[in-house]
Amino acid sequence: MAGALINDLINLDLTPVTDSIIAEYIWIGGSGTDMRSKARTLRGPITDPKQLPRWNYDGSSTGQAPGEDSEVILYPQAIFKDPFRRGNNILVKNLLLILRDSIEYLFRLSGEPIPTNKRYSAAQIFSHPEVEKEVPWYGLEQEYTLLQKDINWPLGWPVGGFPGPQGPYYCSTGADKAFGREVVDAHYKACLYAGINISGINGEVMPGQWEFQVGPSVGISAGDELWAARYILERITELAGVVLSLDPKPIKGDWNGAGCHTNYSTATMREEGGYEVIKAAIEKLGLRHKEHIAAYGEGNERRLTGHHETADMNTFSWGVANRGCSVRVGRDTEKDGKGYFEDRRPASNMDPYVVTSMVAETTILWKP
């Protein structure tokens, strides 16, 4: 009875009694991968981040500021509908568009961006006239692992033991092969509700591991949408009582790691003759391979071994339809003479602001 009452209150329609809305401000914590949030009441409806007030939080409690200068300011940059508090017109204009205040600029009171604020430098690259002219498209393939709570062991695996070897789990169906589909489907629908450009999901090679894709998204919006999708997934796993892991190699041994393959194209790559532009861009990526690897996620050396559909992190390579290369070009791109390519090096815990802007900066702005 108590549980039913709580559910009733959670789903309470506030529209008849107030024009207030709840704005959940979310940001990235001190580790660069942990997500934080807090809510406030505002007058609605709100449809543009410029309508939102700045806010602040205690940076000394998130590892982002000292106690004597602890105030960090949030500058709203993007909004999404809230799939948790959702409907009843309370968080939305007239169309059940509930507010989700997504990834914000994080500044100290001095006006300087704090180190974990990667969006600031990314926005500078994406606002460069040469980059804007190329209208860079991204498709981000976010792999992740669901873990059993308290024991940090993949979902569906016997406690302290191992399932059968990899093979039957990729894009699988069945209670003995697919573990956590209810979380995955809930996340898929929640992202669509929120207005995130999520383009698909699939089960991955290691049991308990899944993937969702965001895109195609243009420029800075790719980072905004992936961070918002990660936040929603974290909230759903919280409700489901499982743990989300973005570790690039959660289980040692003969098991696939987790990456965030980054598909990319520019306007000239998508036009006739674009294949030559693609090859020139890949050549540039190869020249800055070490610099990119250093920025592509923590613990990536445990994943990029040359095995399990990866290239060795110490050697740059590219090929058509080759998933053992650093960069893969699709068969259709080769056949059509234009299209996109896939950077397979980024780890699952990469910062999408860093990776997307770095790819654009290297391929468009950098002059070797």
Image (tube, rainbow, N blue to C red):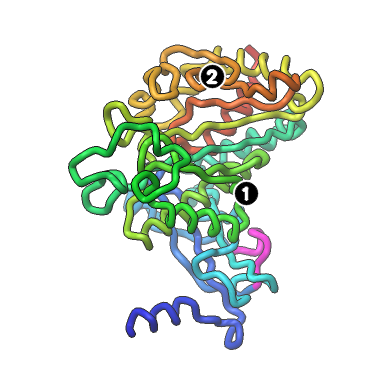
Residue 122 visible in the shown view: yes
Query: Residue sitting at 55 percent across and 58 percent down?
Result: 189
In the rendered image, the quadrant that contains the C terminus is: top right
Element on which disc 1 rests: loop
Report whether 348 appears left or right of 17.
left
Q: Tell me the amino acid under the disc marked 1.
A: Asn
**Frontmost residue, 280 versus 233:** 233
In the rendered image, the quadrant that contains the N terminus is: bottom left
- Provide residue 277's location: percent of width, then percent of height: 72, 18
Q: Quadrant of residue 192?
A: bottom right
What secondary structure predominates along the stretch shown in magenta? Answer: loop
Tag 1 residue: 197
Q: Look at the image and say whether residue 190 sits in the magenta stretch.
A: no
Tag 2 residue: 322
As displayed, is residue 170 above or below residue 272? below
Q: Which residues are magenta?
A: 45-52
Q: Give the mark nearest the N terminus, 2 or 1.
A: 1
Report whether 90 appears left or right of 143.
right
Q: Tell me the amino acid under the disc marked 2.
A: Asn
| Residue at the outermost right position | 272
Q: Quadrant of residue 199?
A: top right
**Frontmost residue, 188 versus 288:** 188
- Provide residue 352's location: percent of width, then percent of height: 52, 38
Query: Residue sitting at 81 percent across and 22 percent down?
Result: 272
